[in-house]
């Protein structure tokens, strides 16, 4: 070994610290101001939330040459924002058949002004009532969606799915994405219908699980995840968390705070040192050694989109 070489462990710790410091310097406080006037008017403005990169990849693909991407975990800190664009889109994962809590809260506190508004949800197994629920959510908050569709991708919910098995499945993403792109680019008016079987599946799930029907996955991080003995305290878990609900204590990451149950921390940990606490009736992970991030998305992009360092360090 060369005299000045550093270990992989130290390199990862340095990377985590560098990502956090760079993000703090670059983002500043630009998304914390109160907005009573409309923000700059855009051609196509797409808001996204992504834990493992699937929704970020779709958002990037839909943005096109003239599109602008905005992160929901960053934009949610604005007070009463007004967004204007020729077209506005929302891209997010589907959790328990509906939009994640952070996405719902963002929609409720924002005003959207556009000629065409669309939403695309990414899912792995079943999307069921997502289009119907999202359409009603928009109406309840003073606007209407012109287009709502879903696209099947790798299911990243680890208690039920082995990422090695999921990766091996051909879910026809390129052709399905191309069809969605074409529809949005032509401003098609379409909301994917929800059939009776999907409604029954959704109803059965909520009845069996006992989950809240509006915020089914919002919980406390210490009840969901924990770091193992191989944790090196690099801090990437906290940097990718949309609530910033990790802290470093004696060189080890400790989960503490609000949790979206997005599992960004688990999937993006460079040493695979974060595991899920089994919560009956859900099973244990089928493969603790398999993790996932969309191959078209870098971990730095997820950090830039989700990190709460500028908000959790205030005061």
Image: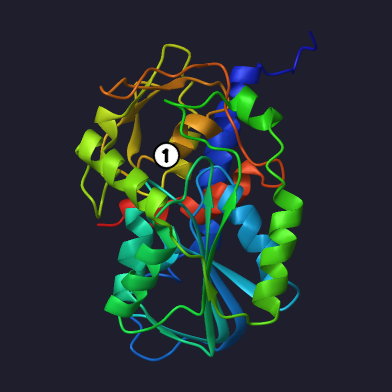
In percent of the image, x 47 and y 39: which residue is there? Answer: 264
Whether residue 313 is visible:
no
Q: According to the image, label 1 marks what residue?
A: 238
Furthest toward the top, the residue is 1
Dot 1: within a 10 Å radius of its alpha carbon, few (fewer than 14), some, or many (20 or more) residues? many
Q: Secondary structure at mark 1?
A: helix
In percent of the image, x 38 and y 17: which residue is there? Answer: 284
Of residues 214 and 27, which is closer to you in this image?
214
Residue 138, x across and y down, in percent: 36, 75
Does residue 239 appear left or right of residue 278 in this picture? right
Does residue 238 appear left or right of residue 14 in this picture? left
Please say if 156 is above or below 112: above
Please say if 295 is above or below 128: above
Residue 276, x across and y down, in percent: 38, 23
Residue 184, x across and y down, in percent: 65, 75
In percent of the image, x 33 and y 40: which residue is there? Answer: 245
Of residues 85 and 249, which is closer to you in this image?
85
Q: Quadrant where the C terminus lies?
A: bottom left
Quarter location, residue 283? top left
Residue 158, x across and y down, in percent: 46, 28
Please say if 38 is above or below 290: below
Please say if 205 is above or below 132: above
């Amino acid at each position: 070994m060369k005299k000045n070489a550093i270990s992989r462990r130290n390199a990862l710790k340095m990377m985590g610290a560098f990502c956090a410091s760079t993000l703090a310097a670059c983002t500043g406080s630009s998304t914390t101001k109160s907005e009573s006037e409309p923000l700059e008017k855009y051609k196509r403005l797409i808001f996204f939330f992504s834990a493992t990169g699937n929704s970020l990849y779709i958002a990037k693909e839909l943005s096109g040459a003239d599109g602008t991407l905005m992160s929901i975990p960053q934009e949610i800190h604005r007070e009463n924002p007004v967004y204007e664009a020729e077209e506005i889109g929302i891209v997010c994962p589907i959790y328990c058949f509906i939009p994640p809590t952070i996405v719902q809260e963002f929609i409720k506190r924002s005003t959207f002004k556009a000629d065409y508004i669309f939403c695309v949800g990414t899912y792995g197994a079943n999307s069921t009532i997502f289009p119907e629920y999202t359409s009603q959510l928009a109406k309840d908050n003073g606007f209407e969606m012109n287009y709502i569709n879903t696209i099947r991708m790798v299911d990243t919910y680890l208690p039920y799915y082995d990422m090695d098995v999921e990766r091996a499945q051909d879910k026809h993403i390129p052709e399905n994405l191309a069809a969605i792109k074409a529809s949005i680019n032509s401003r098609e008016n379409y909301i994917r219908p929800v059939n009776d079987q999907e409604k029954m599946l959704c109803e059965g799930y909520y009845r069996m699980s006992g989950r809240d029907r509006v915020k089914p996955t919002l919980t406390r991080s210490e009840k969901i995840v924990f770091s193992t003995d191989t944790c090196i305290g690099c801090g990437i878990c906290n940097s990718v968390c949309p609530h910033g609900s990790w802290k470093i204590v004696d060189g080890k990451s400790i989960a503490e705070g609000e949790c979206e149950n997005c599992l960004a921390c688990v999937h993006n940990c460079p040493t695979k040192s974060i595991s899920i606490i089994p919560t009956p009736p859900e099973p244990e992970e089928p493969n603790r050694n398999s993790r996932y991030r969309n191959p078209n998305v870098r971990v730095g992009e997820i950090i830039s989109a989700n990190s709460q360092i500028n908000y959790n360090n205030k005061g």
